[in-house]
Amino acid sequence: MIVLVVNCGSSSLKYELFDGDESLSRGLAERVGINGGDDAILTHEYGEESIAKVRAPMPDHTVAFSYVVEVLTDSEHGQIESLQEIEAVGHRVVHGGEQFTESVLIDDEVIAAIEDFCELAPLHNPPNLEGIRACRQRLPDIPMVAVFDTAFHQTMPAHAFVYGLPYEMYRDHNIRRYGFHGTSHRYVAIEATQYLEEAGIPRDRQKIVICHLGNGASVTAVSGGCSVDCSLGFTPLEGLLMGTRSGDLDPAIPLHLIRAMDMDAAEVDQLLNTKSGLLGISGVSSDMRDIMQSARDGNTRAQLAVDIFCYRVRKYIGAYAAAMGGLDAVVFTAGIGENAPEIRRDCVQGLEFIGLHLDDASNNIVGDDQEVVVISTANSPGYILVIPTDEELMIARDTARVVADLAQ
Ligand code: ADP
């Protein structure tokens, strides 16, 4: 089945075209709607290393999507001859609240629900909706599926998702832990679960901690194949130190910033989401590669940022092992998790006491194209694995499944 996967951010439109599990092409429209979209650019990648670029005004996602359609069907750079070849579209949607526990076919009711959840994800759901509307307008007869970042975490028990606030805050105002990065965690959980089953650990007994370490970073506890806790919370601000986000902090700090430092809510929001984390501590960059280089050059604040990042990952691994009453495997994924052996080493340093023994040699030689790489020693009671994530493939698979179920 030919499936187009669409992921819209506030000023971007990311897409990937699949035939089954095979990726045919992928691309990104950037600076959509910024300054009227005058500086927008679409980069389309296909084949081994072929690239086509489209520079044109893209005032909104509908216009951006029309260029995506054009390049996908272009006689020189395109992979399909006509739009009719696209059999389904899968959309990434960040927030599905408590309503969506799995991927669903998009209809008017689903769109209304996604709209309702804009209040919970004001930065993410509105552009996701714009993408859905742009596609619907252009491809009105093609089935579309919504794949939610929060869905995988809906199996969390109440003791993991209710905060220590008056219970009415949850019951009447939907304030609870939702968890995010669910599509990535689910993809990696499926791969890890299968690997451990082949290694002789039955799925319903498996206890796995997945560390998604990218610009955004999160840890998920997966027991019996289901998410039972996630470091991201009511919003994607809680938990680990991230590129520009603070992660965990004393909830009284924002109040102190407002009362004693004269900041307003918008300034605090900006500080916590865009000026904190690796960037705020290092003062160098939000990008782990730059920070590691700076630390090697002797910058102590950059080193501190790395140390805090790894310390928090270690803390969460220990906490989730305790929460699940054991640990069969820790999995590293996403940009940092897949590519930075030094960070992986620091994240499991000292965790031999819960059965994690790193094999330095294999940790240092993880290649690109392997699906599951074991970096623990042969005698290690717990596995340490590296599994490259693929959110777009997960969305494409879900979309094909939901649409195939429809036909039955
Ligand atoms: P996003 O959350 O934007 O999808 P990614 O999963 O692409 O992020 O991860 C981006 C992060 O991965 C950046 O901090 C980048 O520096 C880091 N990264 C990528 N390659 C390496 C590497 N070889 N060593 C260290 N960090 C890396």
Image (cartoon, rainbow, N blue to C red):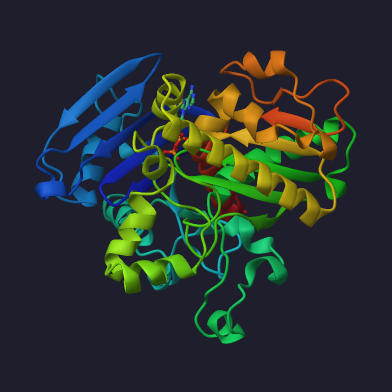
Q: How many marks?
A: 0
Q: Looking at this view, is 387 or 325 the one in front?
A: 325
Q: Looking at this view, is 85 or 345 the one in front?
A: 345
Q: Position of residue 71 (x, y in %)?
A: 25, 30
Looking at the image, is 4 positioned above or below residue 274?
Answer: above
Q: Horizontally, is 295 left or right of 45 in the view?
A: right
Q: Horizontally, is 49 left or right of 96 in the view?
A: left
Q: At 41% from the left edge and 35% from the top edge, which residue is drawn?
A: 16
Q: Is residue 225 visible?
A: no
Q: Position of residue 47 (x, y in %)?
A: 39, 17
Quadrant of the image for the C terminus? bottom right
Q: Horizontally, is 364 left or right of 279 in the view?
A: right
Q: Position of residue 352 (x, y in %)?
A: 81, 33
Q: Position of residue 279 (x, y in %)?
A: 37, 41
Q: At 35% from the left edge and 64% from the top edge, which residue is drawn?
A: 122
Q: At 46% from the left edge and 20% from the top edge, which residue is drawn?
A: 296
Q: At 57% from the left edge and 51% from the top edge, which residue is drawn?
A: 182
Q: Quadrant of residue 375?
A: top right
Q: Is residue 52 visible?
A: yes
Q: Looking at this view, is 385 or 321 the one in front?
A: 321
Looking at the image, is 175 positioned above or below residue 396?
Answer: below
Q: Looking at this view, is 407 or 360 the one in front?
A: 360
